[in-house]
Image (tube, rainbow, N blue to C red):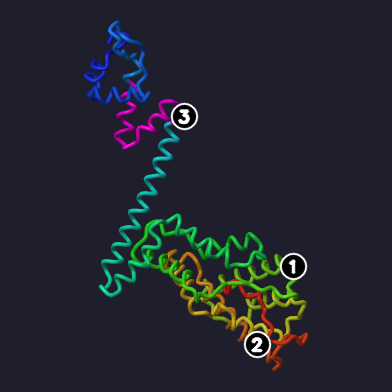
Amino acid sequence: MTQDTWSIGELATGTGVPVKTLRYYSDSGLLPVAGRSTGGHRRYGPEAWERIRLIRRLRALDTPIATITQVVTGECSLGELVATELESVQERLTELRWRQATLESLHECTSEERLRRLEVLSRVQRLPEARRTLTDHWYRELSAAMPKRRLDSMIAMLAPDPPQDPVPATALAYAELHLLISTPSFTRWTQDHDDEMKDGPAFYAEIDDAAALTVASLAQGLPPGPGDAVNAFVSAHARARRESDTPAFRAYLHGLVSRSSGFDPRLERYWALVGTATGGRVLNMTVAHRWLTDGLSISIAGNAPSTSQGPSSGKPASRRNPAQPQGSR
């Protein structure tokens, strides 16, 4: 081609794009006009050919005209466009996988169960909102006195992200979490700190150390019993109350933690559902709580504890102790 400008008809013939479409591109500002003929018709310069090719390639990817306009006007780069579109596609794929898992879950059950599952699964079809529902619930329930890093860690476990590639079982488990927290009788995880609890961050740091030791013991398949995990757990509570680690204090502490919410069957079911929804990546904290409590009980038996019903200072055993192990909150 040796000419400097082309008519819209010549562009249509050369590119295979209908004149009507090219006129729309021109009217939208996508196809700049180089000038006008003596008859007032629009003429297009050499850059129009490459611009049309770019538009056609992006339209082949179903890119909206408004987005293409941002690219050709320099409002965003082609790389930014690709990244944004890829994220959008991934979101749509996740939605489709959830819809597939939902339908499969409804398909594989009995007609009597189907209506119940439909009610439960309908709660989590808007995934970002479903995640926020869990997060907001546990931020309301957990104590604001808890150190922020530990609070955020607990929320991450209690309100996991929806499974990215769900199967019917994981989708249903994630939906059941929302059903549980919406139940009025579901255990509330409030924490009433008594006057004895000093230096909260230090206490929680020690409790986290005990939890880490417990998780390691569970991972090794060790049975509950005396050892570093139990000792660390008792030490944290003893320090918080300015007590000594004695058989009497251990007996008192065992009475407190064995009555805690860690053994609430509804909370135990919640942790089990979290485990299913996350493919086992989150430890069932009621299992850890029970392991610690059983280990504490065995350590008491081994130390021949006194029959005192309270800690060594003589405080009544019936007094509520809000500082429970990590798995009980």
The disc placed on residue 199 is 1
Residue at screen point 43% across, 59% down: 162
Q: Nearer the viewer, residue 71 or 292?
A: 71
Give the main secondary structure, helix, strand or loop, of the magenta stretch. Answer: helix
Q: Nearer the viewer, residue 106 or 202?
A: 106
**Image quadrant assignment for residue 313:** bottom right
Q: Verify whether residue 195 appears in magenta.
A: no
Looking at the rendered image, the quarter that the N terminus falls into is top left
Residue at screen point 29% across, 66% down: 106
Range of magenta residues: 50-77
Q: Amino acid at mark 3?
A: Glu
Q: Earlier in the sequence, mark 2 or mark 1?
A: 1
Residue at screen point 45% across, 56% down: 129
CA–CA distance in space, label 3 to label 1: 53 Å
Residue 255, compared with residue 39, is above or below; it is below
Q: Residues within 10 Å of mark 1 (few under 14, many from 20)?
A: few
The disc placed on residue 75 is 3
Q: Residues within 10 Å of mark 3 (few under 14, many from 20)?
A: few
Question: In the rendered view, does 289 fall on the left or right side of 313?
Answer: left
Q: Verify whether residue 55 appears in magenta.
A: yes
Q: Earlier in the sequence, mark 3 or mark 2?
A: 3
Looking at the rendered image, the quarter that the C terminus falls into is bottom right
* Nearest-to-viewer mark from 3 and 1: 3
Residue at screen point 46% across, 67% down: 274
How far across and how far down the image is residue 171, in percent?
38, 63
Q: Which residue is disc 2 drawn over?
A: 300
SS category of the residue bearing label 3: loop
Q: Nearer the viewer, residue 134 or 160?
A: 134
SS category of the residue bearing label 1: loop
Question: In the rendered view, does 14 fall on the left or right side of 233?
Answer: left
Q: Earlier in the sequence, mark 3 or mark 1?
A: 3
Q: Amino acid at mark 1?
A: Asp
